[in-house]
Amino acid sequence: MRRIVAARTVSRACRYALLGGHGLLVLFPMLWLLTTSLKDTWSIFKDPWKLPETLQWVNYSKAWISGGLGWKFWNSMVVDLVALTVILLVAAMAAYALARFKFPGNRVIYYLFLSGMALPVFLAIVPLFMLMTDLHLLNTRVGLITIYVAYMLSFPIFILYGFFKTLPGELAEAALIDGCTPFGVFWRVMLPLAKPGLVTAGIFVFIGLWNEYPLALVFLSKGELQTLPVGIASLTMTQRYQADWGALFAALTISVIPTVFFYTLFQRQIQAGLTAGAVKG
C-alpha cells in the first residue's frame, strides 16, 4: 500500500513538474517582452536580462502616437471584429446544415470547405487582387473583410460541424412540435447550445485575423487604412534606423494584449468546445 501511495505521489510530482516547466516556457517570453518594453535602448543592449531600473512608460506613447499604432490598432479592431461576426454566423449556419441535414452532395460540400484550409494564401493573392480591382473594392475595408470571410470559413465550419453532431436531435424535434420553424430551431435552440464551440472557433479565428499580414498589406495599401500587423512591420523598419528599440518592443506588447486577454477570458469555454467537438464526422 505504501508503495502504491509513493508511486502515485511521484507520478503526481512529475506531472506538476512538467506542467510547471511548460508554463515557464510559455510565460517567460511574454514576461521578457513586457519588461524589455519598459527599458530604454541602452539598457536593452547593455543587459537584456536585467529588470528595468526606471520604467520607461514613454515607450508606449511613442509607439501609440508617434509610431501611428493608435489608429492602426482601431483599424484592426473594426476589420477583424466585423469579419469575425460574419464568419461565425455563416460558419454556424453552414456547419449546422451539413451536420443535421442529409441531402445529395452533403459530404462533397463539407470536404470542399475543409480543402480551403490546405490552400496557401499566396496562391490566391493575384486572382483576388484582380477581382477586387474589377469590383472597385481595393483599398477598402469592405474588400478586406470580404476576403477574410471567404478565407477563414473553413476552420470554424470544421470545429462547429463536430460540435453540432453532438447535440441531441430530440431537442430539435421538441421545438418543431412546439411550433418553432426550422430556422427558429437553429437560432433559439441549437445556436445557444453551441456557445462553447462558437467561442473556441471565434478565439482561433480572431487570433488568425489579428496577426494576418500579407492580405492586409496587399489589399489595404493606404496609410490611413492599414492594420496593426502592417503598422508594426513599418515601425520595425523605422525604429531600426532611429535606434528606438524600446518603442518597438512596446508596439509588440500592444499587439499581443488583445489575444492574451480574450484567450484568458474564455479559456474554459475553449476547453469545453474542443472536447465537445472531438467526434468523428
Image (spheres, rainbow, N blue to C red):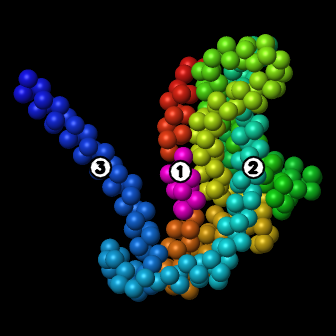
| Image: 281 above or below 119 | above
Q: Is residue 32 magenta?
A: no
Query: Residue visible at 55% across and 78% down?
Result: 60
In the image, the segment drawn in magenta is 256-266
In the picture, measured across the screen, residue 9 lies left or right of residue 187, that is: left
Kind of residue at disc 2: Ala
Disc assigned to residue 187: none
Query: Residue visible at 81% across and 59% down?
Result: 141
In the picture, measured across the screen, residue 205 lies left or right of residue 264, that is: right
Q: Is residue 106 among what the camera can see?
A: no
Residue 137, percent across and down? Answer: 88, 56
Residue 173, percent across and down? Answer: 73, 13
The foreground one among 90 and 120 is 90
Q: Residues within 10 Å of mark 2 (few under 14, many from 20)?
A: many
Count every numbered label the image shows and give the total.
3
Q: To which residue does mark 2 refer?
A: 83
Q: To which residue does mark 1 refer?
A: 265
The numbered mark, 3 or 2, whose residue comes first in the sequence reads: 3
In the picture, measured across the screen, residue 227 lies left or right of residue 233, that is: right
Name the chief secondary structure element in magenta. Answer: helix
The foreground one among 217 and 62 is 62
Residue 246, percent across and down? Answer: 49, 79
The numbered mark, 1 or 2, whose residue comes first in the sequence reads: 2
